[in-house]
Amino acid sequence: MNTSLRGRRNARRAAFAGVAAVAVFALAASPAMADPSASPSGGASGSASPGASGPSVPPGSKTFTIGIPGDIDSLNPYSGFLSVSYELYGDVYDLLEGWSQKDYSPVPGLASSWTHSADGLTWTFKIRSGVTWSDGQPLTADDVAYTFNRAINDEAANAQYYNYVKNVKSVDAPDATTAVFHLSAEDPIMTQLWVPVLPKHIWEAVSAKDSGTFPNDAMVGSGPFQLVKRDPGQSIVLKSNKKYWGGAPKIDYLVYRVYKDEDAMLQALRKGEIDAVDEISASGYISLKGAPNVTRIDATGTSFDELGFNTGAATVDNKPVGNGSPAARDPNFRRAVAYAIDLKSLGDKVLQGYGQTGGSIIPPAYTNWAYSPGDGAYTYDAAKAGQMLDAAGYTKGPDGNRIDPQTHKELNLRFGAPNDDPRYKSDVAYISGWLQEVGIKTTTQLVAEDKLTDLIGNGEVDMFVWGWGVEPDPSFQLSTMTCDQRDTGTPSAPTAGWSDSFYCNAGYDALFKQQGQTLDPTARATIVKQMQQQLYTDAPYIVLYYANNLEAYRSDKWTGIQLQPEKGGNAFFQMGTYTYRSVDVKTKAVLASDSGGGLGLGAWIGIVAAVVIVFGAGGFFLVRRRATADERE
Amino acid sequence: MTATTVDSPSPEARTASGGGRDNRIRRKLRVPMLIGRRLVGALISLLTVLVFNFFLFNVLSSDPIKALVRNRHLDAAAQAHLRHEFGYDQSLWRQFVAYMQQLLLHHNLGISTTYTQPVWSVISTRIWPTVLLVGVSTLLSSLIGTWIGIKGAWERNGRFDKISNGVSVTLYSMPEFWLGIVLLLFLAGNQVGLGVFPLGGMNDVDVDVSSPSGWVNVAWHLTLPCLTLTLAYLAQYSLVMRSSMLDEMGQDYVRTARAKGLRDLAVRRSHVVPNALLPAVTQIFLYFGFVISGALTVEYVFSWPGLGLLTEDAISGADFPLLRGLFLLFTASVIVCNLLADVMLGVLDPRVREL
């Protein structure tokens, strides 16, 4: 189950990570929180369709159904948080740019092309003409300018999309097909703007204070799909936009259906009640081996789990925080630990082999950015780890445990991890075992995520296991290792405080700044890899593994599945709608027999159930009547 | 159910024979007075729960802001701003007053932090699925369970008694989610099972739930979760009814009835059962109180979009306003059903009115 979709782990998209730090902030900041009666009536938050009656999907339509482990949290792209909500926004709204199916490189979206001035401070986007909103109104550059200006000025919108507009001063639309962005500083993120373009004529009626709580039930968009109905807790039904500028999807309907229990979801796939599943567990994936008509997809993941160290908890003005062990601050100690951990067998045991061995903080799925340590990698060698520890002064005491050379006391590292995911528990158990083998004693602290955040932030643990989801652009992930992101700083930038290792290196920070000003992708990639190399050497994190994204679909019925990235990528929940637009039924015959048979029998059983109820109740009253009749005897 | 007056001389019979105008007025007022007393009691319970409910979550969550920002780091200024906007910078007492004011004067339970919509609008869409599921299953298991209890007790240690007792107690001792998964695998899934029923949800997307075919579709989806709950709770009713029957069967009035020469069936129907039903009826009403809090695990297994699933979401999202709203609803429904049980018992059993 991916309940961990929320929180730190699954930042599949940019909006999850850097920007969402303050997502709830703006929502809460709106006075509407205290007075919901003031929010404009967008209808009840329940069913989304304008005409609630009637079936959402006419029987016999080409409907592609994906099982999801939980409902979306909001139809409003200013307040949604879960990855399934972002998935929905990506289906219903257009983005200016896309990410290529091949390797995530920028491709045209609603903007057919763009150019920037020599200094990188003025970006001009050519907006497609002839595009209409789902309510029939024409989409123009004016809508684009409105969307981005709102993302700059509106608190809720800014909180959600801060990362994309942090360097944008304003946007204007000189004509219907041109949008001009004025920047205060160069920013490579301009080619990866994950900001849904919203209709001005709808949103200008929503006041700033209602931004976060506006129900947005109609979800007027210009994307390849349009919202038909949302059944809270149960399903989201989308209809394909036959007039979509990128070509009409081949299916008629795209449905997301909630299956809380993974076993039930996998049974539904086997039976054909749903057509695809995404992010299933390794054991679930293994159980589908040999399932008739099901094809499995073992995609390279874009998230990682790490062993992080408290490399010296401090505020941004270098005031020390907490009581971290000096050992964790010592790069030699951390490197020795890296040799003491058998990453290969950790991945085999914890992920049952469905993952890649850890390396850099940018996952190898992002081929353009990821750094590979190659020959310089820390390969498991307990003897070498022992020698390194001896050399660094961490000699063994009488009972075999190593002594801290500074305090002359036995080392006992506090080892924290979130208690909500069995995976973290396994990580911690294996790692403590390997550390004990080289004489490093640890005390495990499995706690709730918010408690762990406190412990880390207050510098009260020495090391921890946790995870991150990484977006295609490397900026945010790299930023978490800069000095500015250390905790409890002065109230400054809204995203301050993302660092949990408290890593701080002036050289690294200079490179970070430099990559942010380098618009040429190849030159930027060189700097980005250099930064990753620095991190790998200093080892504030030891990246444990990249879990694969495990998916499966009904290959007897469906064809046209597209992978992103092309090599070893995933088919669903992509950066874009490649699969959803190209997937099609294999033959008409298959469609005709489509699960309709069960309904007939089911209907009968439903009727039987109803009859049982009626007879049960009838019998009860009969008994009572007879009882009174007897009395009259 | 006046059989009691025949065989067991009740206080009711005595006062009635005493006659007198005052007594007659008192008797007329007895039921309303009983209801009034219970109503006051229920209101006091509800208020206690409200207070407890408010402070409970303040104890649980060390920092509501941390819960609100979903465990993300947030800079100090933003946290302070949040705290102020939500009123968390005020004293607990003033927060409580504000909460009660919003609740009682504006009927406002706050905004769900997960769904960013008013708590009540989130909850209201989930009530009916749960009432349907747990209501139908409680009705079925109470009717069937009561019937098993009556029949089993009458033929005590007979074959029916032994089998029904064994089966219902076995089902009762199974965790309901396990029973649910077994039923799901064998009746809904087609890997090892029959594949007859759907694997989750309340209705298909290609039906109109407001049409007769839509109702059938809902009933079809309802069958398995409802069956799970019905089977799991049969013993709860059958055992109470059985022991209550056995108690009554040993009473003198039963012997009298037999001595009068009444047929076996008549003794059972008009003498034993009505008296034995009293504790069972109370119990059924009490369990109806839990109808609304749903069957979290069964809703989970069958992805039934009710309050149980919503509670699970609220817990995993640390959505305290939503949890508060749900807890309030759950406790209120238990209190209301308790009240109904008391009143029903008063109506059914004249002895209670005297108390």
Image (cartoon, rainbow, N blue to C red):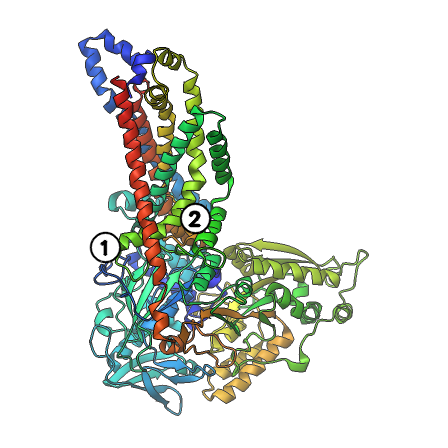
Q: Quadrant of residue B38?
A: top left
Percent coordinates x, y for residue B140 in the rendering: 36, 39
Chain containing the residue with disc 1? B
Where is residue A616 drawn, in percent x and y? Answer: 32, 37
Judge the density around disc 2: few (<14), some (14-19), many (≥20) Cα neighbours within 10 Å. many
Q: Please name the residue shown 33% across and 34% down the image.
A: B337
Q: Is residue A433 above or below residue A250?
A: above
| Sequence-first tag of 2 and 1 | 1
Q: Which residue is label 2 attached to? A: B298
Q: Is residue B32 left or right of residue A186?
A: left
SS for tag 2?
A: helix
The residue lying furthest to the right in this view is: A398
Of the numbered discs in the image, which one, if any, rests on residue B211? 1
Q: Which numbered dot is residue A30?
A: none
Q: Amino acid at mark 2?
A: Val
Question: Could you tell me if residue B290 is visible in this image?
Answer: yes
Question: Residue A339 placed where, x, y %?
Answer: 70, 71
Amino acid type, callout 1: Ser
Residue B90 seen:
no
Q: In the rendering, at what x and y percent does residue B279 appear?
A: 38, 26
